[in-house]
Image: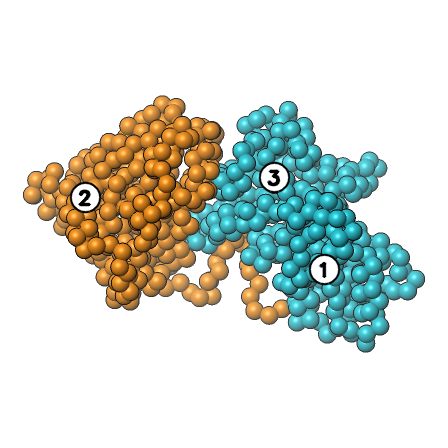
Chain colours: A orange, B cyan
Amino acid sequence: MTRDDPVRLYRTVRLIRRFEERAVDLVRAGAIVGGIHPYLGQEGIAAGVCAALRDDDLVTGTHRGHGHVLAKGADPARMLAELLGRETGLNRGRGGSMHAADLAVGVLGANAIVGAAGAILTGAVWARRRRGDDLVGATFFGDGAVNEGMLLEAFNLAALWRVPVLFVCENNGYATTMPVEGAVAGTIPGRAEAFGMPAAVVDGQDPEAVRDATAAAVARMRAGGGPELIEARTYRFDAHHTFEHAVRLDYRAPQEVAAGRSRDPVEIQGARLSGVDRAAVDADVEATLDAALEFALASPEPDPAGALAHLYASGLVARTGGG
Amino acid sequence: MPRLSYRKALTRALADEMARDESVFLLGEDIRVAASNVTAGLLKRFGPDRVVDTPLSEQAFTSFATGAALAGLRPVVEFQIPSLLFLVFEQIVNHAHKFPLMTGGQAEVPVTYLVPGSGSRTGWAGQHSDHPYSLFAHVGVTTVVPATPADAYGLLVSAIRHVDPVVVFAPAGAMDVRADVDFAALAPVPIGRGRVHRAGDDVTVVAVGHLVHDALAVAEELADQVSVEVFDPRTLYPFDWDGLTASVARTGRLVVVDDSNRSCGIAGEIIATVVERVRLLAPPRRVTRPDGAVLPFAPALDRAVQPGREQLTAAIQLTMKDE
């Protein structure tokens, strides 16, 4: 089975879907504190983009970042342990939902400051290529980020220095509660075109369409091309953040939500599989997540004595208390 | 012995580290032509791949450096204007500084931020004359403020070799200081280690950066009245509390001269920590910029807002009168 096999792609969207549904349940049960930004509905983008990347390619994610981390190949058990604040988590319980990172699989981190990760990824890809690696990068961000100056500065640097970074805009229609029409002057592809970057608009609900658009862009970038942008049109099925489950915010009409949910990336990709294959993947995903949850719940919580461990890579210990 | 200027000491440190370590490169505005006169000659010696001029995109290139560091390089980012640090405070604090902890120790971010000409240069007014080292000490970013050419060399070398982000403030008031230096004896200066410039028995004067030279001049002027010990912390974070405590434990009196605004400036922290540790013979004093100061343009006003020798003399005399 190759990485872009339809079954593999289905497994990734299904894994993210069920991971997120279970994570929402764990938030409701009080097991995950602080809440999460569910990636529900947007799974096709992370799955499609990462299916067209190599293991050594680099990505950065967002506050709505579980899908990116899982699609790039992080262990769901250690990801779940991170959400539960366990020592065995990807970040040893120091990062949580919004900062999940797994440098071993090329995830330089979910990043909770909107628009901030593009420049970081641009620098990382530039540095690795300078050392002779021919890898590329993909940085995910939402429609809200296209109004952040530092992302636009990153567009300029990447284009100017021809750094092969794919800027992936997940346009789910809302920056928290602000609709795109209320926030974005011009267009999202227009942002890229202003810097001389090729831009494509794809159906973010179709994992194969996202994969194909990414594969085309990545092929051009590997052949020496500069950065490109993909606007993936999508819809967030659930809340901006799980706090909305407690405090209903009135910004999306029920009809709109129903229409958005009717185009489900898991169903779209699932329909491309035989019933037997699909059932087998579903069972495998459940078994994987059962084991992940068992692992996470059995893992120790970090020792408070080490609350500031890793504050400095140099091992400096912060002064605590008086004197 | 040959004379070495502070500015040339910085250039020499950059050149030596670039020659020693291929992963060191420079990033900043107008550094190819050396507008700050610190990177002079480095383009010719090391080429444009290692002396990288950037567009005016401070936020993007600061995070670009974070990414390059995550990918294994050691960027040195030059800022021509100290007040630009307010613009990139987000990129340094929220990303470069937080990555090691947030990733649970997966990430190292060895970036050096070099600020030649920090503080007032006289006549550069409100937006070019800040000295924000206390802010970086507050958030826990390693912060050094060398006063002499040898320390400028040694601390910049140590900063570049350090595995965590370091801000190197090179005060405008020290940039033209020259000293007799044995070039063969130039060496890294350990981060976190202070230095007694002048031994004394009656009062410890802690002076930061260029103010060390003012403190030494005042100590000399007062030599027949009071025996002043001048302590230069060199690193503000992590601070050499043991070194300072040893000094004040002998003298029993403390005066701090610091080019920060008074509220929440490093002088307040120095006094607080010393009084937690040492029973003083007299109340401690501090000489700083006023609360919340913005540096005014006219030279007399500029001087009026900065800590000066007259104020320091008065503070020393006051603390000697108190019992």
Name the residue located 72 percent from the left edge and 38 percent from the top edge: B7
State the image coordinates of residue B89 (x, y, percent, origin top left).
Answer: 54, 50
Mark 2 or 1: in front is 1
The Cα–Cα distance between marks 3 and 1, rounded to whole angstroms, is 26 Å
Q: Is residue B198 or residue B225 the one in the foreground?
A: B225
Crowd rating for badge 1 (residues with CA inside 10 Å; few <14, some 14–19, many 20+): many
Name the residue located 78 percent from the left edge and 43 percent from the top edge: B177
Callout 3 touching callout 1 (CB < 8 Å): no
Residue B25, numbered label:
none
The amino acid at mark 3 is Glu
State the image coordinates of residue B11 (x, y, percent, origin top left).
Answer: 68, 35
The Cα–Cα distance between marks 2 and 3, rounded to whole angstroms, is 46 Å
Which residue is identified by label 2? A265
Q: Is residue A278 or residue B58 the one in the foreground?
A: B58
Q: Secondary structure at mark 2?
A: helix
Q: Secondary structure at mark 1?
A: strand
Which residue is identified by label 1? B288
Which residue is identified by label 3? B78
The Cα–Cα distance between marks 2 and 1, rounded to whole angstroms, is 61 Å
Mark 3 or 1: in front is 1
Q: Is residue A132 left or right of residue B133?
A: left
Query: Which numbered disc flags the more N-terminal residue, 3 or 1?
Result: 3
The amino acid at mark 2 is Pro
